[in-house]
Amino acid sequence: MQAAAPKKRKRTSTTAPKAAPPEHDDDTQNLLPPAPTSTKRKRVSKKAKELDTTAFRIPRVQSPWKVGAHVSARGGVENAVLNAAAIGANAFALFLKSQRKWEGPPLSSSSIRLFKERMKEYGYDPKHVLPHGNYLINLGNPDAAKRAKSYECFLDDLRRCEALGLKYYNFHPGSTVGNTTPEESIQDIADSLNAAHKETEGIVTVLENMAGAGNVIGSTFAQPSSHSWRTRRASACASIRAMRTL
Ligand SMILES: [Zn+2]
């Protein structure tokens, strides 16, 4: 009886290490991620390259009212069309480049081609697409150098609209930045609009009505309709956010 007890302890201590690391030969392999995970990742990335667009063909509301959202253009402006279709939108907004950088890579020829193809494929009329301007643009800045930088960014956006065959372009009118009067700021914006209209063809600039913080232009309906604009091809847009504050 006394000799049997130590034998049982020995069996327990020798079987335990075999059961714990059954598939590992050394300590290094225990630190690596399991092999099946890396195999799965490779399979997903291959499928992702072949985009299945059938998922974007969901029923769309048939209505003269155009309802949509500002959709993501991540990966290229052509993807905005798919993102709009995926939520059943019959109109949509998008950024034409990064909204918080002065410059962005030029639209590639394949992006332009795919955008136009998908617009037709998914039945979107260009006049139901409203690109949103870069947030940095301030055509009402009294500082001439800063206003010129804004104008270049603004013009670049308009040329992207032209390249994509779009008709409208929505932007925040601007701000006095506290250094000039609203009237002078509006005149500077109008001058920039007239110059941009001469350099482009057919794009209608849409002035977004603003919520009205500090020195921002466009917080009252009187400002967008000011005679100071003296510009053609400009329209006014009241955003939902602005309407809520009125
Ligand atoms: Zn806006």
Image (tube, rainbow, N blue to C red):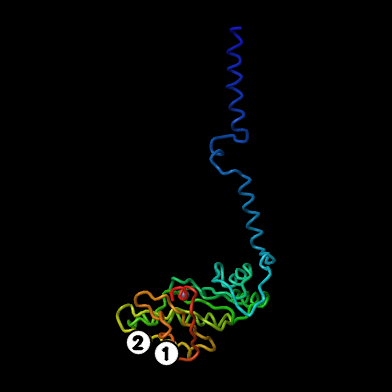
- Asked if residue 172 lies left or right of residue 66, the reply is left
For disc 1, the neighbor class at 10 Å (few under 14, some 14 to 19, many from 20) is: some
Q: Amino acid at mark 2?
A: Glu
Secondary element at tag 1 = helix
Question: Is the residue under label 2 in contact with that under label 1 (CB below 8 Å)?
Answer: no
Mark nearer the N terminus (1 vs 2): 2
From the top left corner, tell me how far across and down residue 14 is, in percent.
59, 22
In the image, residue 111 sits, relative to residue 46, either above or below, namely below
The residues bearing labels 1 and 2 have C-alpha atoms spaced at a distance of 10 Å
Residue behind mark 2: 183
Residue 113, picture quadrant = bottom right
Can you name the residue that lies furthest to the front here?
246
From the top left corner, tell me how far across and down residue 176 is, in percent.
34, 80
Secondary element at tag 2 = helix
From the top left corner, tell me how far across and down residue 167 is, in percent.
56, 84
Residue behind mark 1: 229
Residue 142, picture quadrant = bottom left
Q: Amino acid at mark 1?
A: Trp
The reply to whether the residue tagged 2 has its Cβ within 8 angstroms of ligand 1 is no
Q: Looking at the rendered structure, which numbered label has been put on residue 221?
A: none
From the top left corner, tell me how far across and down residue 174 is, in percent.
40, 80
